[in-house]
Amino acid sequence: MTTLPPTVPWPRRRSLPEPLRTIRRIIRLETPWLRPIGRVLKAMMPNSLLARSLLIIVVPLILLQVITATIFFDRHWDTMSRRLNNAVSAEIGMILDYMDVHPDPADRQWMFALAHMREQLKTTFEPHGMLPMRAPPDQSEDFVAETLYRTLADHTDLPYQVDVVDDRTLEITIQTRDGLLRVEVPRKRLFSVTTYIFMGWMTISSVILFAVATVFMRNQVRPIRRLAMAADALGKGRDVADFKSEGAAEVRQAGLAFTRMRERINRQIAQRTEMLAGVSHDLRTPLTRMRLQLAFMEGQEGTVELAQDISDMERMVEGYLAFARGEGTEDLVATPLVELVAGVVQRMRRNGAEIDMHAEAPVTVPVKPQALERCLVNILGNAHRFANHISIRLGLRDHSVEILVDDDGPGIPADRREDVFRAFVRIESSRNPRTGGTGLGLTIARDVVRAMGGDITLEDSPLGGLRARVRLPL
C-alpha cells in the first residue's frame, strides 16, 4: 500500500456545484421552507414496506392518469366536440339560408324532410311564433347543450335558445322573421361515446395493474417479513431451524447472512458450554481435595475458618460459572407461568422469606423453565436479604407477561440501578459473600430474561423499597 508523504494532504472530496446542491436539498426537502412539508409527508407515509411500495407505484400511476386525462380532454375532447357541434350548427345555418331563399311552405317541408332523413334533424316551423326569453344553459348542468349554444353563434345572428328535452335529445328554438323554427338534435350527433370507452379502459387497466403490483409486491415483502420474524425468534431464544432464504437476490443475501450468524451463535454457545463444563470439573476437583484434607485436620487451629473459606470459594465458583454459562442449551418450553412462580415462592418461603403472591389469570408462556427459576430465585433472594416483606404480582400487559417483585427494604438509589446489572458490581462494598453475595445475581437474572426476549427494570416500590419488573413476551 502506498503511503503519502506527511507534507502531501489527502485529496479532498470534490464538492458539487451550488445549483446541484440546491436541487439536492430541494429533493431531500432540506430547505427551511420545505421542512414543514417534509414533516407532513413523513407523518402521512405508511409504516409498512408493502404500503410504501404500493404508494410508489400508485402515485406515478395516478399522475399518469391525470396527465393523460388532461391532455385528452384539452385536445381530443374539445376538438372533437367543437367539430361535431360545428357540423350540426352548419346544417342548421344551411336550413335557415334555404328558408330565406324559399319562403314557400311546400319547399320548406321538403327541406325539413330531407334534413330529417339525411342529418337526423327533426325540424318544425311555427308561423308567427315568438321565442321565450330564457337564460343560456349552464355548463355545470349540461356540457353538450352549453357547447352547442356557443357554437350556434358562429352560424346565425338570429335569437335562439337551446333546451334539453331528455337524455337523448336537445331542442334548438330559433326566432326567424316570419315565425319560430324548432330543431330536435340527437345527442349522439354532438357527443362521442369513445370518451367513456377511453376512460373505462384506462380505469380498468389501472385496476389490473394495481392488482398485479399488489400481488407481486406482497410476494417480494413476504420473505422480508419471514426474515424479521426469524430474527425476532432468534433474539427470544426460540428455534428457527425451518428458516429458508428466498425472494429477491438482496433478500436472499440477507437471509444467508442471518443463517450464517445463527450458526456462529449456536456454535459459540456450544463451545462455551463444553469449555465451562471442563472448567467446572477442574475447579471443583482441587476444592474437593482441600475439603478432604481439612477433614483429616479436624480440631487443629484455623481449620474452621479455612473450611468456611472453601465453602465461600465453592459458592463463588458456582456463581461465576452460572453467569458465564448463561441460558446454556436449554430449550424453550410452553410453561404454565403461575405454577412455575408458585414453586419458586414456596421454595423461598421454606428459607424463611415472607412473600405474598397474586396472579391475575393462568398464562402459558414459552420460556426456559430452569433458567427462569434461577432468575426468580436471584431476584427474590436479593429482596429477602434486605427486606422483611416481599410481594409478587403476575399479569398480562400489552401482549406480554409482567412479573412485579416489590419489597419494603432500603431500595437502591436511582442512579445506581443500572450499575447493579453489571457483573461483580455490589451496592454493599465489603465483598463479604455472606452479606452482599458475589455481585452476579441480577446480572444472571437480566441475562436469562433477555435471552428469552424480555427485560428486567428496577423502579421505586409502593412498599417503600425496590420493585423489579420482569417482562416476558408471549
Image (cartoon, rainbow, N blue to C red):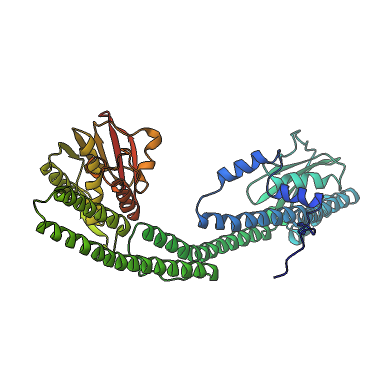
In front of the other: 454 or 162: 454
Q: Classify residue 68 as left or right of residue 342.
A: right
Would residue 182 be seen by someone viewing this image from the given angle? no
Q: Quadrant of residue 371?
A: bottom left
Q: Residue furthest right?
A: 101
Q: Classify residue 260 as left or right of residue 354.
A: right
The location of residue 394, given as percent across then percent down, is 23, 42
Q: Quadrant of residue 32?
A: top right
Would residue 105 be seen by someone viewing this image from the given angle? yes
The location of residue 339, given as percent across then percent down, is 16, 49
In what quadrant of the picture does the N terminus appear?
Answer: bottom right
- Total of numbered circles in the picture? 0
In front of the other: 208 or 393: 393
The location of residue 306, given as percent across then percent down, is 18, 51
Q: Classify residue 422 as left or right of residue 321.
A: right
Q: Classify residue 319 as left or right of residue 229.
A: left
Taking the spot 14% from the left edge, 60% from the top edge, the residue there is 293
Taking the spot 81% from the left edge, 49% from the top edge, the residue there is 18
Q: Quadrant of residue 116?
A: bottom right
- 296, above or below 395, in the image: below
In front of the other: 348 or 455: 348
Q: Residue furthest front?
A: 301
